[in-house]
Image: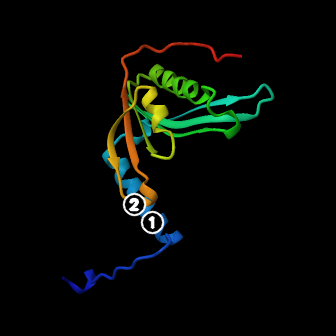
Amino acid sequence: MPPELQLSFSAHDEIPLEEGAIVDAGLGESNDQAAPLHEVRQLSCFARLASGIVIAGAVGRTWGTCCELQQLWVSPEYRRQGIASRLVRTFENHARCRGCHTFYLETFSFQAPDLYRSLGYEVKLALQGFSSGISKYTMVRESTDAPSFEPWPR
């Protein structure tokens, strides 16, 4: 190895800000050159009380015919009332209007895999090895349904 390529390696328990920014920027540049990431579009849906207070939300993105649900949250006092299901369907419907028919997400076993199964998602990858017997699932749902425009119940 030429002297100018002599390398040193280091490992850290945290990500140093400067080095982390260098990796983020380098990966972003590489990805931008390899794929049309400018086509990725954010998508979000929220459930609000009459007062306007947000009690639930779904956050993700679409790219081509794929839609990724990245976050789903319902305030604890409003859980188990069908709000999450309605929110996911509203999120998917908006994505279908963009031409999406493949929906996917990641969830842990302590989160909502049963909810997603009830909505037609299937586990495509299960990873074990997390502490306390926790598993992580990648779940997918294919849909050929046309968008529906059901109004949110008032």
Say which residue label 1 marks.
Answer: 22
**Which quarter shows the N terminus?**
bottom left
Q: Is residue 25 above or below residue 148?
A: below
- Residues at discs 1 and 2 in contact (Cβ within 8 Å): yes
Q: Position of residue 55 (x, y in %)?
A: 69, 35
Q: Residue at x 38, y 24 (%)?
A: 101
**Which quarter shows the C terminus?**
top right
Q: Position of residue 48 (x, y in %)?
A: 71, 29
Q: Amino acid at mark 2?
A: Gly
Which residue is at the far right?
A: 51
- Nearer the observer, 111 or 88: 111
Find residue 23 and report its image quarter.
bottom left
Find residue 145 and report its image quarter.
top left
Q: Position of residue 30 (x, y in %)?
A: 34, 54
Which residue is at the far left?
A: 1
Q: Position of residue 92 (x, y in %)?
A: 48, 25
Q: Residue at x 41, y 22 (%)?
A: 99
What separation in Å lies between label 1 and label 2 (alpha carbons)?
6 Å
Color style of the picture = rainbow
Residue 47: numbered disc = none
- Nearer the observer, 28 or 110: 110
Find residue 104 and report its image quarter.
top left
Q: Amino acid at mark 1?
A: Ile
Instruction: Report helix, strand or loop for mark 1.
Output: helix
Say which residue label 2 marks.
Answer: 26
Which residue is at the far bottom?
A: 3
Q: Residue at x 51, y 13 (%)?
A: 148
Instruction: Report helix, strand or loop for mark 2.
Output: helix
Which residue is at the far front?
A: 133
Q: Residues within 10 Å of mark 2 (few under 14, many from 20)?
A: few
Q: Is residue 52 left or right of residue 134?
A: right
